[in-house]
Image (cartoon, rainbow, N blue to C red):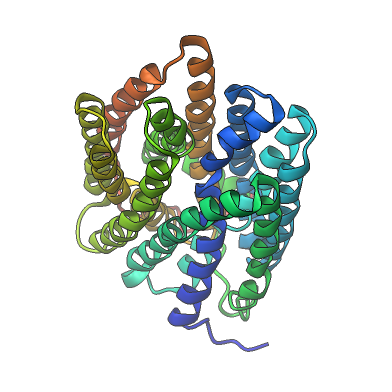
Amino acid sequence: MPSAPLSLRQVLVCGAAVVTLSMGIRHGFGLWLQPITQAQGWTRETFAFALAIQNLAWGCFGIFAGMVADRFGAFRVLVGGSILYALGLAGMALSPTPLVFSLTAGVLIGAAQAGTTYAVVYGIIGRQVDPARRSWAMGVAAAAGSFGQFLMVPVEGFLISSLGWQQSLLALGAVVLLVTPLALGLREPGFGGAHAPRREQTIGQALREAFKYPSFQLLMAGYFVCGFQVVFIGVHMPSYLKDKGLSPQVASYALALIGLFNVFGTYIAGSLGQRMAKRKILAFIYLARAVAIAAFLWAPLSPLSVYVFAATMGLLWLSTVPPTNATVAQIFGVAHLSMLGGFVFFSHQIGSFMGVWLGGLLYDRTGSYDIVWWISIALGVFACLVNLPVREAPILRQPAAQPA
């Protein structure tokens, strides 16, 4: 087996393509809310609950996907994730009951996303890219996911209008299998040998160290807010705009604009993370989100105001991802990066669960999304404050520490 590490170009091209497919498809799920609920006679809460389960499953399975990727390399995880993704999309199209829909659109796709998105890909970047360029490289990968949203959301809208909602899901199930050949380019040579990350800790030691460290807890709290905001907006904004009398095309263009501007936002955040304190970057992003949402609710609603809001949120959308994961790597090292990143992301997904589910629940109870919008504003201020005390310096360990 060759001993040289993967080239930077190979890691970025293949990793970016995987994230583009995986994240690009999921960003358009909000477009299926009304077609599926109207065709099946389900409430919005039914659809929202399945996607809430998806986000929670993504977080739960992400921890174990990270452990496997750290121990055996990411190739097996990526291949398994692509197969589960295809099965989940097919099940989403063919589910006859809300329970089956929750199991396929929720559990199966959630598990698939755990194995094909940031935690696994960032683990490869952390192990294969020099620390001096790590935050930048993570920004490139996150920008690829944003480009996937810009690319895939209009494609998904076109597929729904031309093929129908069921056939379009089956077509996407075939497309997502392209992750498998891309995973070949991310097969880490020498993994477990000379170029494997040095393991000075067991999994248990790494977890105890992280969860006792206040900055890790603060990063998890901030990431909870990130999940709440972006998934609520991504899933419920199309229906919110339609309820206000705007055409479905406005929602499709808005989601695409979020993806387009997030390409720049995530790249800028990753690049700035090499030169300034990441905690300040994160605090600014969360505060700016709160201001943007408040301004959106205050301004008269029109296609122009929607597009301005989408562009602004796009700059802030996944720009939290590179500085958060780079901070985890900087504090704890890369030996258990996928696993620790999985735990931080689990907090993100609990927030995602709450955002998407509360959006559907409170809409069904009150006929409005207003309460959840204002919760999002308050959480943005909270996340700004909890990120400011984060300490980014590498943690000091006892050199003679031995496994228990």
Foreground of the two, 243 or 74: 243
Q: Residue at x 63, y 30 (%)?
A: 37
Foreground of the two, 170 or 81: 170
Q: Quadrant of residue 370?
A: top left
Q: Is residue 396 visible?
A: no
Foreground of the two, 342 or 118: 118
Q: Residue at x 47, y 60 (%)?
A: 148
Q: From the viewer's perspective, is 250 left or right of 291?
A: right
Q: Is residue 91 visible?
A: yes
Quarter of the image with the N terminus in it? bottom right
Image coords of residue 356 (percent x, y): 51, 30
Q: From the viewer's perspective, is 22 left or right of 112?
A: left
Please give the count of numbered marks on the rendered protein: 0
Q: Quadrant of residue 269?
A: bottom left
Q: Residue at x 61, y 46 (%)?
A: 63
Image coords of residue 157 (percent x, y): 52, 50
Image coords of residue 204 (percent x, y): 61, 46
Q: Residue at x 64, y 25 (%)?
A: 46
Q: Which residue in the rendered view is the most extreme toward the top?
A: 366
Q: Quadrant of residue 214?
A: top left
In this view, 355 is above or below 329: above
